[in-house]
C-alpha cells in the first residue's frame, strides 16, 4: 500500500486511532527510504549544548528526518524561564484588556469549542545560529481551537491594535538597572492575531500537549518562528500600543547592516515570520549507491537544489506528501559515482516566486550581526568509505 494514502487518511482520523497510526512501522521509517539502506553519519556533528536547560532535546538531523511528524519525545524544546507544571483543573485562560466582554475559560470550555488541526513545522528563530544549535526544529500535528472566533466573541474595541500572549512562566529581568519579575510574553498585531491559522493548542500529535511544550494550552502561530507560539498560555490581552517586552524588543531582535546613500545603517527588527530554508538531513547508502535526503520549509517551496563539493546545483525530487503549507517538505537526490573521501553537501530551497535561500556570503546573511533568523544555506561535511 502506498504510505501516502494512509498519510492522507490518517489526517482525517482523530483521537487514539491517530496515535496508533503514528506508531505504525511505515511512519517510523525515512520518508523516501529504500529497504535495507544505512545512514552515513555527518562528520560535522553539533558541539555540546551549553544553554543550561534553555534549549533541550535536540536531535541529530540523521534521526530528525526519519519520520515526517517528529515524535513528541523527540521534539526540541526552548524555555527561557521556569517550566511551570500547571494543574489543569485550576488553569484558566483570561481574555482581557481592550475587549467589550472579558472572558475566563476553563480547559473543558476551551475544548468544547470547534476543533482544528494544523501540521506545522516549528523552528526556533535561533536555529543554525550556533554550532551547537542546528536542529531546533520539529513538525507536529497540533490540535486545538482557533483563536479568531474567541477574540470576536470577546469583542475587541476599536482602539485595540495589539494582542499580547502571556505565559505562566516567569523570570527576573534587569532593565535600566531595575530588577523586575516578568512573565514570558509575545505579541502580534490584531490583524496577525486574527489569522484563521492561529490555534489555542491543547494537543500535539494526537496526545495531550506535553508539559514541556506548554501544557495545558499554548498558542500555535503557523508561519511564524517558534518564539511567537507562547507556551503555558494563561492570558490574552488586547492593548492599544506596541508591546515591547524582552522577546519582542530586546531578544529575538535581528540586527542587519544596511547601506543607505553610501552610509552604513544598523537596522533592528523583531523576529517574526518564518524565512525560506532547507537543510541536508542525511546521506543513505544501499548496495553502494548513495542518496542525499533533506527537508525544506519556512515559505512555499517550489524546488530544492543540492550541491556537492561546490559543483553544479542539481534538482532534488520533492516528496509530495501534501501535509499543508505550514509543514516542511522532504526531498531527495541520488548521488551517483560518489567517491570515497570527504565531501561537502549543501542545499538551497527556491520559493514560489523564484527567491533562492541565500548563500552564507550573501549580504542578507553576511551583514546580519545577530544569530537569529539564520536561514542561509546549510553545508554539511561527510566522509564516505
Ligand atoms: N511561555 C513560553 N513560551 C515559549 C517559550 C518560552 O520560553 N516560554 N519559548 C519560545 C521559543 S523561543 C520557541 S522556539 C518555542 C519552542 O517550542 P517547544 O519548546 O514546544 O519546542 O516556544 C516558544 N514559546
Ligand atoms: Mo526560539
Image (spheres, rainbow, N blue to C red):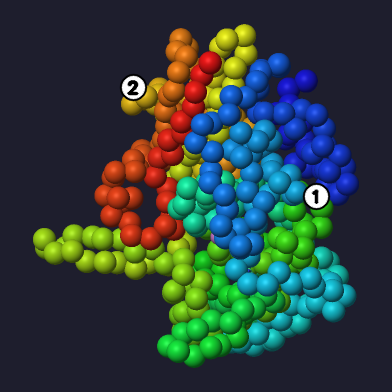
At 46% from the left and 43% from the top, the residue drawn is 277
Look at discs 2 and 1 and give the one toward the viewer. Answer: 2
Residue that sits furthest to the bottom in the current view = 178
Q: Nearer the viewer, residue 101 or 75?
A: 75
Image coordinates of residue 359 in percent, x first then y, are: 34, 40
At 71% from the left and 69% from the top, the residue drawn is 83
Per the image, label 1 sits on a secondary structure element best described as: loop
Whether 178 is drawn above or below 252: the answer is below
Image coordinates of residue 364 in percent, x first then y, are: 31, 51
How packed is label 2: few (under 14 Cα within 10 Å), some, or many (20 or more)? few
Whether 26 is drawn above or below 46: the answer is above
Within 8 Å: ligand 1 and the Cβ of disc 1? no
Rendered image quadrant of residue 31: top right
Q: Nearer the viewer, residue 329 or 78?
A: 78
Within 8 Å: ligand 2 and the Cβ of disc 2? no
Q: Is residue 108 visible?
A: yes
Whether 19 is drawn above or below 264: the answer is above
Per the image, label 2 sits on a secondary structure element best described as: loop
Q: Is residue 303 left or right of residue 328?
A: left
How many circles with numbers are drawn on the protein? 2
At 45% from the left and 18% from the top, the residue drawn is 341
Q: In this figure, which residue is indicated by the disc labeled 1?
A: 206
Alpha carbon of mark 2 to alpha carbon of mark 1: how far? 43 Å
At 71% from the left and 16% from the top, the residue drawn is 36
Q: In this figure, which residue is indicated by the disc labeled 2?
A: 312
Q: Is residue 158 visible?
A: no
Amino acid at each position: 500500500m502506498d504510505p501516502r494514502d494512509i498519510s492522507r487518511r490518517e489526517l482525517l482520523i482523530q483521537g487514539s486511532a491517530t496515535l496508533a497510526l503514528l506508531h505504525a512501522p511505515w511512519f517510523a521509517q525515512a520518508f523516501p527510504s529504500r529497504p535495507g539502506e544505512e545512514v552515513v553519519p555527518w562528520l560535522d556533528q553539533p558541539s555540546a549544548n551549553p544553554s543550561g536547560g534553555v534549549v533541550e532535546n535536540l536531535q541529530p538531523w540523521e534521526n530528525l528526518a526519519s519520520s515526517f511528524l517528529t515524535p513528541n519525545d523527540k521534539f526540541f524544546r526552548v524555555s527561557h524561564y521556569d517550566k511551570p507544571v500547571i494543574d489543569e483543573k485550576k488553569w484558566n485562560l483570561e481574555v482581557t484588556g481592550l475587549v467589550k466582554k472579558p472572558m475566563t475559560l476553563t480547559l473543558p470550555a476551551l475544548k468544547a469549542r470547534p476543533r482544528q488541526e494544523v501540521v506545522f513545522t516549528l523552528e526556533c528563530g535561533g536555529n543554525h545560529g550556533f554550532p551547537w544549535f542546528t536542529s531546533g526544529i520539529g513538525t507536529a500535528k497540533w490540535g486545538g481551537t482557533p483563536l479568531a472566533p474567541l477574540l470576536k466573541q470577546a469583542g475587541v474595541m476599536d482602539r485595540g491594535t495589539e494582542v499580547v500572549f502571556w505565559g505562566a512562566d516567569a523570570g527576573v529581568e534587569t532593565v535600566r538597572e531595575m530588577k523586575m519579575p516578568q512573565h514570558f510574553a509575545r505579541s502580534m498585531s490584531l490583524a496577525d492575531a486574527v489569522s484563521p491559522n492561529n490555534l489555542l493548542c491543547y494537543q500535539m500529535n494526537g496526545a495531550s500537549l506535553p508539559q514541556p511544550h506548554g501544557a495545558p494550552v499554548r498558542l500555535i502561530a503557523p508561519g511564524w518562528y517558534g518564539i511567537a507560539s507562547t507556551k503555558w498560555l494563561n492570558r490574552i490581552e488586547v492593548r492599544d500600543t506596541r508591546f515591547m517586552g524582552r522577546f519582542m524588543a530586546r531578544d529575538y531582535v535581528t540586527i542587519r547592516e544596511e547601506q543607505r546613500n553610501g552610509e552604513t545603517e544598523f537596522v533592528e527588527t523583531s523576529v517574526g515570520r518564518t524565512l525560506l530554508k532547507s537543510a541536508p538531513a542525511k546521506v543513505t547508502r544501499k548496495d553502494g549507491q548513495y542518496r542525499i535526503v533533506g527537508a525544506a520549509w519556512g515559505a512555499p517551496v517550489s524546488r530544492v537544489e543540492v550541491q556537492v563539493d561546490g559543483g553544479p546545483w542539481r534538482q532534488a525530487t520533492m516528496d509530495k506528501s501534501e501535509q499543508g503549507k505550514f509543514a516542511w517538505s522532504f526531498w531527495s537526490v541520488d548521488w551517483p559515482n560518489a567517491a570515497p573521501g570527504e565531501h561537502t553537501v549543501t542545499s538551497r530551497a527556491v520559493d514560489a516566486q523564484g527567491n533562492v535561500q541565500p548563500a552564507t556570503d550573501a549580504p542578507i546573511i553576511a551583514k546580519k550581526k545577530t544569530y537569529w533568523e539564520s536561514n542561509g544555506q546549510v553545508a554539511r561535511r561527510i566522509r564516505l568509505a
